[in-house]
Amino acid sequence: MTRLERGETAKLLRSLRRGDRRALSRAITMVENDEPGADALMASLKGGPGRAFILGVTGPPGTGKSTLVDRLVQKYRGADLKVGVIAVDPSSPITGGALLGDRVRMSDLALDGGAYIRSMASRGWAGGLSRATSRAMRLLDEAGYDLVIVETVGIGQADIDVVGVAHAVLVVLMPGLGDDVQVSKAGLMEVADAYVVNKSDLDGADSMVVDILAMVKATEGRSPPVLKVSALKAEGLDRLAAVVDSFRSRLSSGDEEMKLRSTKGMIVELAKAVALQRLLLGSETRLARLAAAVLKGELSVEEAARKLAG
Ligand SMILES: Nc1nc2c(ncn2[C@@H]2O[C@H](COP(=O)(O)OP(=O)(O)OP(=O)(O)O)[C@@H](O)[C@H]2O)c(=O)[nH]1
Ligand SMILES: [Mg+2]
């Protein structure tokens, strides 16, 4: 990096720390597009994430995650916290439409100086998404946000990786999802610190709660709370906020385990990206040689993969 570039990075960081939203947006765009300079920008942030509490919100498509996030933003803005939201645009065309709705719904909040809403696209390879979102979370932390909420549709491993970086994760469900298969199959159970059964204004919320309680009891030693809310009717939100506050206070009272979990998650996601890039970009000739050996019957695919990774 040249001296000029170093100077620019430092200037951008100074503006971002002062609360300049344009500098924040610029920095997030840099990491989203993986622009030259993004690595240096991030590397200049020493220490782990500092004060922001990072809340992951995930769950099957259409369960009301964005509506709920909207309510949480309102609530915490009311308490004068600075709140940042990262909504991960699913690359899937199925749910892509709903996100346009998100933007419309969240636009009022975006006008408020203490709330920053940003949607990030999951373009490119899967590892790029969790790296970009991890970095964006770190930037919001650096910019002095008290609460950072990251919303993903919990349908794939990439989404689970994204929320794995959070200090705590809400898994949002709704009545009528059928059995618990969606939850356990999608890997949502492992990441849930609390379950939210949203749309309690619809039939079947109570039995959904019973089902989840049974599922949780059957599988784990942990017992994450199961909350019944209606984001639409603003019911049950106080209890939800109390649960979120209990997670927040764990962090602010210096809970090492929680801090470690998030920092470890960030390191792993960044390392995965570096490792994958190295694997795919740095060893093209080696890969070609290994593939040729497999085709000649000298190696199995398994052996070739181990050699490539090793
Ligand atoms: N009846 C009822 N509908 C709700 C509630 N919360 C959200 N919805 C509706 O459910 C639909 C989906 O809401 P979103 O908040 O976009 O859901 P989402 O989980 O963010 O959706 P994706 O991001 O596409 O997965 C919208 O039509 C909401 O108005 C609720 O508490 N009750
Ligand atoms: Mg949404």
Image (cartoon, rainbow, N blue to C red):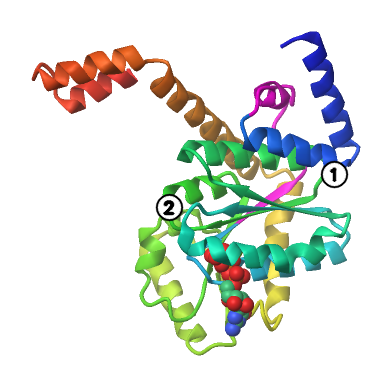
Q: Which residue is mark 1?
A: 21
83 to 203, vertically: above or below: above
Residue 50 showing in the rendered view: no
Amino acid identity at mark 1: Arg
**Viewer-nearest of labels 2 and 1?**
1
**Which label belongs to residue 118?**
none
Q: Which residue is mark 2?
A: 156
User: In front: 272, or 15?
Assistant: 15
Q: Secondary structure at mark 2?
A: loop
In the rendered image, residue 101, in percent from the top left (x then y), is placed at 64, 68
Q: Secondary structure at mark 1?
A: helix
Can you tell which quarter of the image residue 170 is in? bottom right
Ligand 1 occupies quarter:
bottom right
Residue appearing at x 60%, y 38% in the figure: 132
Label 1 C-beta lies within 8 Å of the nearest ligand 2 atom: no
Quarter occupied by the N terminus: top right
Measure how far apart labels 2 and 1 are at the Cα level. 31 Å
Amino acid identity at mark 2: Gly
